[in-house]
Image (cartoon, coloured by chain):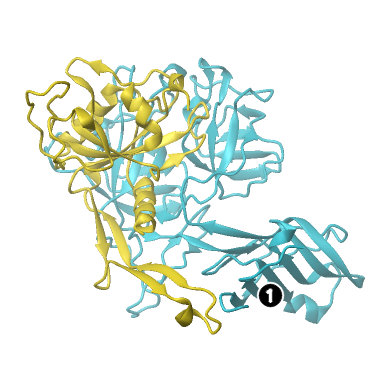
Amino acid sequence: MRQAEDLILRDYVVSAASQINAGGGSNGDNPTNLGLTDFSLVATTLDTNNAYKFMSGIEGMDKFGTGPVRSAYFMLSSTELQSDFDALGSNGSISFLSQWQYPTNASALPSEYGSVANTRILTSSEAPVARGASDLGSDVYYNTVLGKQAITHINQDGFSMNLIYRDPYYSGMLAQNATLAVKFAQAQAITQDTAIRNLLSTRNSSLGV
Amino acid sequence: MTEYSRMAKGKFTSTGGAQIINLPFQPDYVEFTNYTASAAFTDHRVLSAQWDVNMGQGFAITQVKNTTYQTDSVILNGVSTFSAGLLLQFGARQQVVSSTKADPASFEVTGHGFTSGDVVMFQGLYSTQFTAGMPQMDGIPFTVTVTDANNFTVPWNSNQSNYTALAASPSGAFVKKVLYPYLYAPGVSFISAITTGTTTTIDTTDAHNYVVGQEIAIRMPDVVGNTPVAAWGDARYNSLPNNSTPGSPVYAYVIAVTDYNTFVCNINSTGYAAYNSNIAVANVPGLSYPQVVAVGDVNTGGVQLSSGSALYPPPYVSPIGTTRVNSINGPAIQGAYFNNTSQGFIIGAGLNVTDTAAVLVGANGNVIYWRAFLHDMSLPS
């Protein structure tokens, strides 16, 4: 039911927020696939711009296979990039940490896939993808990294969303069809343009589809 | 069986070009009458036409005055429906045949089918894969200015040392149309040129859709591998970090709008490094582009509908030149973000198959009455 709202907000952010092309990957495309340095770069940019992080860190615990998690911004990504995240590896103190490797999952969101440096990654099949739009004709993924104060979603006219159902008796003289609809009135705004970046990337070509 | 059908009717005065009709649905049947042509009953005019979705997009059946009253058809640029609701939709890929080094950059694409104001995106503009060509122009939107049926230009200077002309249909060099480039406006725009001075003139690759009074910010990214790193332009354009007042974004206001892709802002860029789009091909992987974005929730660009009126006209986009295309929105403050999503149908400027002088959408000034339907029951044949 929230999908229509999400798609509108998604396209608005793609249209209005500035972009950084990933350059830390190795596939030779523009943008490249995601590399660990891209996460550092975008987090550094947001930190320099005084963006607020969404989540405080998770302290390390004495549990096998887990690691501490930094305080973090959210990055909204496509589920199609999940294998890329798994293949990120590590570089010094930076590495991909799966959500199931957090010391505790108490603060993890259902769609959270993991974290890299100061970003925690949420994945969705509805994340924006420009098919065949890269330098070499590959799909370009819009990974939106945002601070807490970056965007807002305003429900207008005193209501958020109405789910409307009219059974067949009320939907037509012949009572043949029911009516199911969603009605909402909303507006979106980027409240702080310096606290949001679309990190564009392609996929690691060696991982297949 | 028609309780969920939808019907709409209306009229417009033809400009001679394709006419977009916005509706709250996508019709599966359209019919219209050219009142002006019917009343005058002159030769080579479409008097009326019908289109059914089962004919296919871009078709129509017509009734034409071609010395005698007769039936005819349109099989290209006829009636079609559209749903401009989602971004990042593209038309079919077309092979780039060649490109000469020029400012603006010129491209040859056989039978491209674009019209001036369309937005396109390139990929694979290499004359020699990964070492030479014009890949600096890949992956960002450009507004097309049509030269002829096979050639067009885009606002970018490719007449520079790091660019190599393309010839003989390079493998992998394609262009495709961005179907709905301005669903949310004003959006992020890519910078193609900057003129420094006491005020700063900025050219963008596609329509910026700004108005006078618009507040803007500039992103001037580094070019990885270059020394000095800020090869696109002076780092002082960046809204952050502000080297003079840390933590205070550098914003500017639009003080003049020249045309669809040129505006003047109140940044005093005297002494700033010149803008440089002569990026080496080797630096293209991972290359980020300079951008300008609209910021702020209060814009002073409001223009009253008429003197003394409390109303503002609907927000508009400006796809080419100084042309203004109103959105379907109601009155709004100019310069504020607005949603430009829409759906409906288009009556194209296609020619009839038999009477090739008769244009579907009529001549400039013709008054056309139309009706559109979306049936809730459509039986197969």
Q: Which colour denotes chain A?
A: yellow
Total number of numbered discs in the rendering = 1
Q: Nearer the viewer, residue A191 or A75?
A: A75
Residue tagged 1: B368
Above or below, A39 against A93 in this view is below
Residue B42's image quarter?
bottom right
Name the spot of residue B210 as percent of width and height, x first: 38, 54
The reply, left or right, for residue A16 in relation to residue B172 is left
Is residue B359 depicted above or below B126 in this figure? below
Q: Is residue B362 visible?
A: no
Q: Please name the color used to draw chain B.
A: cyan
Task: Choose top left, top right, bottom left or bottom right for residue B357.
Answer: bottom right
Q: Is A194 on the left or on the right of B280, as rendered?
A: left
> Given the image, what chain letter belongs to the residue carrying mark 1?
B
Residue A97 in view (yes/no): yes
The residue depicted at 79 percent of the width and 81 percent of the height is B39
Q: Nearer the viewer, residue B119 or B373?
A: B373
Which residue lies at the image location 64% right of the left edge and 31% below the top edge?
B96
Q: Amino acid at mark 1?
A: Ile
**Quadrant location of the C terminus of chain B in the rendered image:** bottom right
Q: Position of residue B337 (x, y in %)?
A: 34, 58
